[in-house]
Image: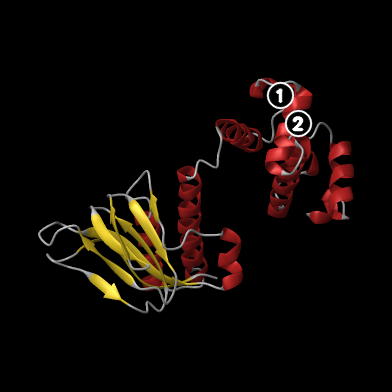
Amino acid sequence: MFRSAICGVATEHREGFVFRTDHAPHYVLLCFRTPFFCVLNGKRYEGRAGDCLLQRPGSAVIHGPLAQDRQFINDWIYFDGEKEELDPLELPFDTLIPMEDRTVFAPLIDRVLKESVRRDAYSDRLISDSIYRMLVTVKRAERVQKNEDTPLLTSFKELRVRILHHYGEDWSLQKMAALSGYSVSRFCALYTGFFGVSPMNDLLEKRLEMAKQYLALNVYKVGDVAAMCGFSSIHYFSNFFKKRTGISPAAYL
């Protein structure tokens, strides 16, 4: 899990403020609301309001306003996390990343602040989830900056969200392909290439996931769950569910 050390939202620093340390003991995420300078690996950069910066423990951290008489405001959080949690994200450390919204991290840091005070059985998980969301936001912004998402991939991502969000609809490959503007064969090839799963199997996995959640509530009949999740018949749903999970839907209740 990710853990927070200290953090702040919309912190207004005194005139002439410059933050400097040669051995920050935690990971640091900064999002600047005003123009600023920073020094990364001995090189000075000038950043704009909305830029963010993610730094590793032990990094030299220097940042402040562009001029001593300039206002300097930022959102910031010091946090810790395990290597196995961080490495898969391939985060852009020690790199200025522009954000579309200069206050994007504020509600997440605010949640961390509140949970740090509240401290009940759920607080650690909510703090960890909030930090994870911040890191994913940074990673996505980096991808936009590098133009890794081509217009075609972006359109397929939007279509995928639409399909999986409306998992209960009567989807067919022909209907999906029509929305993409491609033939069925071309649509399936592109979808599988982008997401590593065929469109119909992707949809079935989503339906199975939602069926498990509905069954776990123990308030719906098996036939109702089948219908809500888009399965054409209770017979097909029961066979599919048992094949994937090893038990019948009724036994899952």
In front: 234, or 230? 230
Q: Is residue 113 above or below residue 193?
A: below
Q: Mark 2 falls on what kind of element? A: helix
Q: Where residue 188 is drawn, which disc sits there?
A: 2
Pointers 1 and 2 in contact (C-beta within 8 Å): yes
Considering the image in quadrants, where does the N terminus appear?
bottom right
Q: Mark 1 falls on what kind of element? A: helix
Q: Where residue 209 is drawn, which disc sits there?
A: none
Residue that lies at the very extreme toward the front in this rendered image: 43
Which amino acid is tagged 1? Ala
Q: Is residue 4 above or below residue 207?
A: below
Which amino acid is tagged 2? Cys
Q: Residue at x 85, y 50 (%)?
A: 244
- Mark with earlier residue (1, 2): 1
Instruction: Answer few, some or many: residues within 10 Å of disc 2's Cα (few below 14, many 20 plus, some between 14 and 19).
Output: some
Residue 150 horizontal/vertical position (percent): 56, 35
Residue 170 horizontal/vertical position (percent): 73, 27
Where does label 1 land, which residue? 177
Q: Is residue 26 above or below residue 144?
A: below
In this rendering, position of residue 212 left or right of residue 129:
right
In front: 209, or 63? 63
Considering the image in quadrants, where does the C terminus appear?
bottom right
Q: Residue at x 84, y 54 (%)?
A: 245
Q: Is residue 226 above or below residue 175?
A: below
Q: Residue at x 74, y 35 (%)?
A: 199
